Amino acid sequence: MREILGRRLQRLRDRFQSLRPDPGQSDSTSALLDAALVCATTWQWPVLPGVGRSGTDGKRCACPDPDCAVPGAHPFDPGLLAATTDPRMVAWWWTNRPAAPVLMATGGTAPCAVSLPAGAAARALVRLDAQGMRLGPVVATPTRWALLVAPYSLERLGELLYAKDHVPSSLRFHGEGGYLLLPPSAASSGGQVRWEREPRAQSAAQQPRARSARSRSPQAQAQVQAGNLWLPEIEAVVDALVEASSGAPGGGSRLAY
């Protein structure tokens, strides 16, 4: 599988090589383009470039807000609705803005996510692993981790959370109309975004038995369309995440990723 994905990525890179304005660009900026192309073509995740940083020290957000809570790590121009899986558009964006963070538009046929403080997330993963829970990809920054889950509706999420006695403010939900910062982007709080657990396609033995598209649930259809990637349902993980977030020092409620 890695060999197949590698060949596909190389063909895409060769196809768009002539678009690069600077053949000597750094490995880090080349990695951002590669990552965006893999997300868009292999996993069928709609992506777009984040606004990025500006200023001599590279710490200030390039958006007009001087007090931006997530500097560099949010959509601006283009807006979130422009997110796409079209490799030509993706290549054009990162050729013109090679250092731009990679953002995924969550929801729809793309994964959703639940994020929480890094320490709490590490404890939650230990608990879920001990329960034998099968997890999907996990995105990590120095301050927060995000577990990717199957797409869910806002109505479904609301019903699920309404049944809880308490939902910590440190727990955040990235659903329809949201976005998530992906590796190897720079994190707004410093450091770099990485995969704590990388996306892996299901093998033939792991795939569910073939069913007609009409008989699949919307969630099952989304998983098939998203590069055949395993994603747990949000109901399967939310209890462990709520419990872990409740014990996070200081609530872990800062917005920075």
Image (tube, helix red, strand yellow):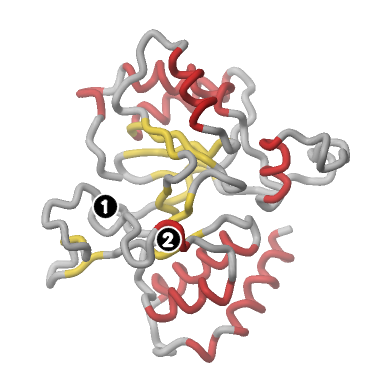
Asked whether, in this view, residue 217 is left or right of residue 80, the answer is right
| Kind of element beneath mark 1 | loop
Spot occupied by residue 7 in the image (x, y as percentages of width and height): 70, 72
Q: Residue at x 31, y 55 (%)?
A: 73
Spot occupied by residue 96 in the image (x, y as percentages of width and height): 39, 80
Residue 115: image quadrant is: top left
Question: Foreground residue, 31 or 114?
Answer: 114
Residue 190 vs 251, above or below: the answer is: below
Asked whether, in this view, residue 65 is left or right of residue 111, the answer is left
Which of pointers 2 and 1 lies earlier in the amino acid sequence? 2
Residue 249 vs 87, above or below: the answer is: above
Question: Foreground residue, 1 or 242?
Answer: 242
Question: Where residue 157 is drawn, which disc sits there?
Answer: none
Question: Where residue 102 is drawn, which disc sits there?
Answer: 2
Q: Residue at x 66, y 50 (%)?
A: 226
Asked whether, in this view, residue 19 is left or right of residue 136, the answer is left
Q: Amino acid at mark 1?
A: Ser
User: Which quadrant of the rendered structure holds the C terminus?
Assistant: top left
Residue 24: image quadrant is: bottom left
Could you give the CA–CA distance between mark 2 and mark 1, rounded to whole angstroms? 12 Å
